[in-house]
Image (spheres, rainbow, N blue to C red):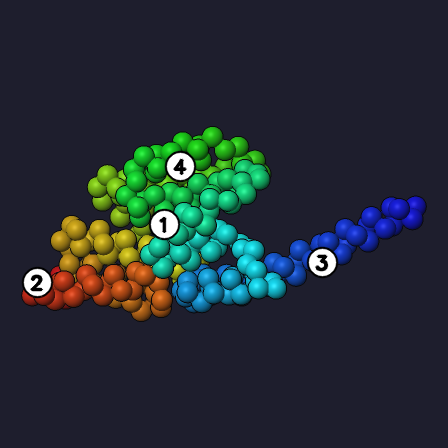
Amino acid sequence: MIATLAFLFYMFLFNILLRYRASCLIPITSLLYDKCDPEACASAIIYYSTKNGKVKLKSQTLFAQCLIYLDDPQLAQDILINYPRKDAASSLSYWSLMANIYYLMKDEDGLNRCKEEAQKIQLGFGQTGVMIQNEELASIQNKIDLMNGEFSTCKKYYLDSLNKARFTFQQVDSCYYIALISFVEQDYPLANMYFDRVINLGNKMCYVSKAKHYQSKMENMNLDINEG
């Protein structure tokens, strides 16, 4: 009886600890997801991962996301080398992030491998798990399509993603690629409109400087980007 009570008390304390750690992470996550400040988010992760002068990195996936949006995919890849893929959910998260990294590094073979590995995962969780896995697979396939120049398909994907976006950083991500595809398609007014949205919402995400770069290129081309 005493042993049972002790075990229940231990589990109670353990659950409190988990909730506390989760609540501590929420404002850090918000720095990227809502404030679009990957630099501040990464700095906060390092701060809370440092103890007695030593860094034991917590939340590797969030840190890798920050590096992706700071335009450093190589370092993001290095961070994920030792990422523990202990279960199906963590494995799916890993391959989804790696797909973003491989796209930025222009590694088509790596992208295809991400798709193959993600397809093998048995996520579970019933219909919810199927939906989550399908969304991640669609995201990976979209990167493959984008690399292969399937711009019409990708634009539809990003427009749909923009409508479904729950966080500001997701809106910025979708707007940037809609703008970029529109620029390639020479639909300059549409490109300019979405680049403006990136600049207005993106704060310190790397897409902001890239959007400004493309707008500068359009200005130098003497385009009437307000027509149509």
The residue singled out by tag 3 in the image is: 16
The residue singled out by tag 2 in the image is: 221
> What's the residue at 53%, 32% (across, down)?
122
User: Residue 169 location in percent, x, y?
Assistant: 39, 60
Q: Earlier in the sequence, mark 1 or mark 2?
A: 1
User: Which element type, helix, strand or loop, lies under badge 3?
Assistant: helix
Q: Are marks 3 and 2 in contact (CB under 8 Å)?
A: no
* Structural distance between the alpha carbons of marks 1 and 4: 16 Å
Give the quadrant of residue 224: bottom left
**The residue under label 3 is which amino acid type?**
Ile
User: Residue 167 location in percent, x, y?
Assistant: 43, 59
Q: Earlier in the sequence, mark 3 or mark 4?
A: 3
Q: Earlier in the sequence, mark 1 or mark 3?
A: 3
Position above or below: 27 against 145: below
The residue singled out by tag 4 in the image is: 114
The residue singled out by tag 1 in the image is: 74
User: Mark 2 packing: few (<14 Cα in 10 Å), some, or many (20+)?
Assistant: few
Residue nearest the viewer, comparing 76 with 194: 76
